[in-house]
Image: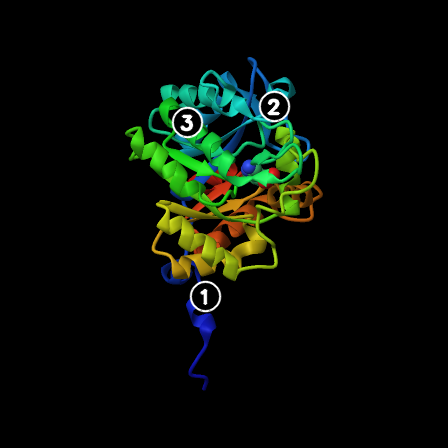
Amino acid sequence: MMLNRPRRNRQNEVIRSMVRESYLSPDHLIAPLFVIDGKNQNIPIKSMPGQSRLSIDELVKEVKELYSLGVKCVALFPAIDEKLKTPDAREAYNRDGLNFRSIRAVKEAVPGMLVMGDIALDPYSSDGHDGLVDPKTGEIMNDPTLEVLAKQALCEAEAGADIIGPSDMMDGRVGYIRMALDESSHQNKLIMSYTAKYASSFYGPFRDALDSAPKKGDKKTYQMDPANSTEALREAELDMAEGADILMVKPGLPYLDIIYRLKEMSTLPIAAYNISGEYAMLKAAAQNGWLDNDKAILETLTCFRRAGADIILTYFAKEAAKLLNK
Ligand code: PBG
């Protein structure tokens, strides 16, 4: 006799699905998309097989397909022409700029699609940093950056973005942006804060996609040290106090413990960003026949849910939605 046999609860798919603790649906997914200027452009990103930089007309097609598959939120990342990049990153709040034209086009074509706009200066800065750089010392200037970020947020809100996503890691930006939005009657725009964003080597393919790598130095004075987790709780407390609606952890896979800790300590929904390097690793292995692509995608995303992520930003969104709809 053996009283406890955990295998009894695993003996067939019916009982397994009855006791399953986490599940995945397209409702949980946000698809990040890269946008470029031009027409009919669909330029594959080498380090992210299956992902492309899309001109707005192609972007709209992609958004329609995602929507029909049940993915109802996209995060837009514009790749800006080098000529438009300046030390003051003023293209970040040019109302006719690519970012705002993309947001408007998506909302016009598919009004039900939630659009998340990125807040950070790196795509627009000739220094390739998320904040303004002091030309004398090379330091990232926190408070002067906040003003630029707030302008960018207002332009995104006016263009129709539903969610404002500050990915810059400047201190105080959530509160600063919240105030700017509320003062302009945008009190219903959500802020999904990149609360615990780490200085990670896994951002490489994303920086290829946008040509946004820092020209000098690294991002360690604003992005978090991968060795820390209690510090993430401090960031979370501040973002909650400053009015964030959703807290995000980024990267995702090597940081599942951070997702878990934030989920435990916060009453806000938690998002996880399954980033470019994580996508590249899985795709490279799958292309070599070393992993089963479809199974690895669904397992990866389910594990985010198990760790406590309510929402997952992932380049697998379209593939996963297709698999889930089967
Ligand atoms: C920067 C930003 C980065 C990503 C999104 N916004 C990378 C960075 O800090 O250089 C990375 C996303 C990914 O790797 O998929 N504002």
The residue that label 1 is drawn on is 10
The picture places residue 117, in percent across and down from the top left corner, at: 45, 31
Disc ID at residue 128: none
Could you say where residue 9 lies in the image, as x and y percent from the top left? 42, 68
In which quadrant of the rendered image does the N terminus lie?
bottom left
Seen as rendered, the residue at the extreme top is 39
* Label 2 crowd bin: few (<14), some (14–19), many (20+), radius 10 Å: some
Q: Where residue 86 is drawn, which disc sits there? A: 2
| Residue 144 in picture, x, y percent from top left | 50, 34
SS at mark 2 in the image: loop
Q: Mark 3 points at which residue?
A: 156
Viewer-nearest of discs 2 and 3: 2
Query: Of tags 2 and 1, which is closer to the observer?
Result: 2
What's the amino acid at mark 1? Arg
The Cα–Cα distance between marks 2 and 1, rounded to whole angstroms, is: 59 Å
Identify the image quadrant of the C terminus. Answer: top left
